[in-house]
Image: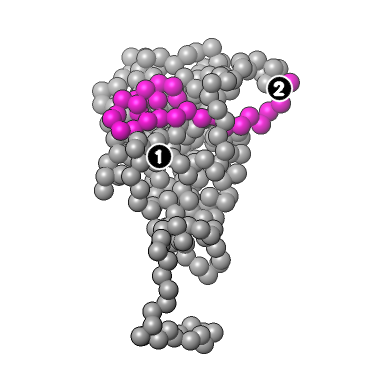
Amino acid sequence: MGKGGGCVPSKKKQPPVSDDPVSSREAAPIPVHDDETIDVATTSLEPRIPSKLKIFIVFYSMYGHVEGLAKRMKKGVDGVEGVEAFLYRVAETLSDDVLMKMKAPGKDVGIPEITAAELVNADGVLFGFPTRYGCMAAQMKSFFDSTGQLWKEQKLAGKPAGFFVSTGTQGGGQETTAWTAITQLTHHGMLFVPVGYTFGAGMFKMDTVRGGSPYGAGVYAGDGSREANETELALAEHQGKYMATIVKRLAQT
């Protein structure tokens, strides 16, 4: 009996049970109070069998370096049977006048903007962004800041996620940028999936400039004129394939 002194149901007469327990459970939003624990079984961890697993590749790219990695990453995901990748960009926060002064190229209109609410439809997410002083760019941080309702209801708990980045120089903080981004996943209860050294010999190449780390794929942009080389792109493709394999394995457990 609770503190309020409510009645105890009769043993002979059971309380009514809905014919559709799943729909009745999902009919109302999950209330969140300071003294209440969220039942993640009713959020993102509820079992389902999709026709194809979906990995969202969500990125911000000002000069196209991160976008180049994202497109190659999609190739890796799509190469795994039963898994499909979808490219999304986050909303721009700078005005057209500022972007013009920064000589930023136009956005690919074929890649849609994503809203926070759409993340619940993904079985896994790969987030890509350039660094700003060792942290993710403000545009991506603004997107994460818009996920408050998902955090409140823990709708993303249990979803695997990873990162890929772009920096101007080798000292620009590719690993640091990933470290500072992990906090976003932690508060959502998401599972960080680093690529580790699964790329093999490519992780040890020292004969050319190469971005990327055990935390995820990366590219060195220099002054903006340097494009990703084949090793950097190959690591991005590998990360996509690796994430797809992990997502598929988790879905089968």
| Residue found farthest to the top | 225
Determine the secondary structure under disc 2.
Answer: helix
Task: Check the picture and name the quadrant holding the N terminus.
Answer: bottom left
Is 72 in the magenta? yes
Give residue 86's quadrant in the image: top left
Is 21 placed above or below 146 here? below
Give residue 76's quadrant in the image: top left
Left or right: residue 132 compared with residue 227:
right
The range drawn in magenta is 70-97
Pick the residue in front: 172 or 195. Answer: 195
Q: What residue type is labelled 2?
A: Asp
Q: Tell me where residue 160 appears, x and y as whole percent.
A: 38, 43
**Res. 46 visible in picture:** yes
Left or right: residue 201 compared with residue 158:
left
Q: Tell me where residue 145 appears, x and y as whole percent.
A: 59, 44
Is 99 placed above or below 126 here? above
**Res. 174 visible in picture:** no
**Closer to the camera: disc 2 or disc 1?**
1
Is 251 in the magenta? no
Instruction: Determine the CA span between mark 2 and mark 1.
Output: 32 Å
Pick the residue in front: 249 or 131. Answer: 249
Q: Which mark is residue 96?
A: 2
Instruction: Return the disc, 2 or 1, that comes first in the chain's sequence.
Output: 2
Determine the secondary structure under disc 1.
Answer: strand
Name the residue: 53% across, 60% down. Answer: 28
Q: Mark 1 points at which residue?
A: 124
